[in-house]
Image (cartoon, helix red, strand yellow):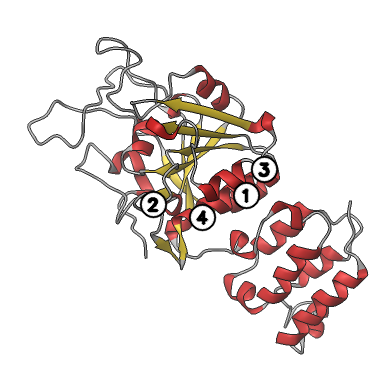
Amino acid sequence: MPVCPQNVMNEFMQRLRAVNRTIDSGLAAKVFGKSSLQALVALLKTPTCAPLDIYRAIAALEATSVEKYRDGLTFLLRSFPGLNGTGIQVDDLKKQAIVQTKAALYQRMLTPANFQPNDPHLRPPRPPTAYLAPRSAMMGVSIVEHLLASPADASILLIHLANPDSEGLAETFNGRTCLQYITSVLRVGRMVGCPVAVLSIGNAANQPLSPVLMTEYNLLPLTRRVRVHENVLHTAGHDPAMQQFLARRPRVVVVGFDGTICVFANVFGSSERVAGLDTAYRPPLLNFADVIMSRATLATRGPLFTNGPDFGRPQFGPLAGLAPN
């Protein structure tokens, strides 16, 4: 395991003291007056200190501590052996207090016999609809925090993110954009070893991600990259490559555009058929794995769309109706 070089430790401490002259006493305190950085500094002094441990220690800090010691933490991420190559920055790890940045877990479920999806945007009267409405609940942590805590738990799926100007990517949550949150998930996922799949549509076959995300994706080992493309339709749960990808981990983190149409259709179901009008519906992603999502990583303008009691709210559960702040 890498050990923090003494020159890095000295510079790190100097930067901490520059904003808190009494930090040494706080680092030595047993009970009262303990510094919020006590665990991190102690970790840096151990011979078993590893990059993942440092990321976890920074992610555990309260946002106020991150802001106070931002200069020192930025230096540490840039200088500790093995950290600078990941591209992970302080804001990728910074704890977020608002509910929009927290992850929600949707439990895997099979398509029921009464599954009858129809276009939810049709004006009434329309045929009865029945999408997947899985058990769901907030996880109490962000997607990044979950990936750091359980690096072998989930894969990552990016849906329809080729256009850098897609509506909703610029919406802000606690001062960061949806695109920045998605980038953080991809960076941390790459570092902890997550397989990553990209679902593209239409003319995006050759450039399936926006330049920012494509740069991050191309840093992944080839063995952890999966590409799935649909020329016309939005969903790909029937695709063998997608099904094999979903089988690699018990859960899949879903991020993408548009949260209320493309993501909804892939996760909870749609009226799209496997082939032709009379064949089976394409299976929702929830048929194959648990799904993890957060409002901050679903590119959508305004609140996460709901359209009555049978569409949106039962499916999105705790994320339904959440809007940028």
- Which amino acid does the dot numbered 3 rest on? Leu
Secondary structure at numbered mark 2: loop
Task: Find disc 3 in the rendering and name its residue.
Answer: 219
| Residue 305 sits above or below residue 267 on the image | below
Front residue of 44/83: it is: 83
Q: Nearer the viewer, mark 3 or mark 1?
A: 3
Secondary structure at numbered mark 1: helix
- Marks 4 and 3, Cα distance to the nearest angstrom? 18 Å
Residue 128 occupies which quadrant of the picture? top left
Choose the circle earlier in sequence order: 4 or 3.
4
- Which amino acid does the dot numbered 4 rest on? Tyr
Residue 132 occupies which quadrant of the picture? top left
- Marks 3 and 1, Cα distance to the nearest angstrom? 9 Å
Task: Find disc 4 in the rendering and name its residue.
Answer: 181
Choose the circle earlier in sequence order: 1 or 2.
2
Choose the circle earlier in sequence order: 4 or 2.
2
Task: Find disc 1 in the rendering and name its residue.
Answer: 187
The residue that appears at 34% across and 28% down in the rendered structure is 269
Choose the circle earlier in sequence order: 3 or 1.
1
- Which amino acid does the dot numbered 1 rest on? Arg
| Residue 157 sits above or below residue 37 on the image | above
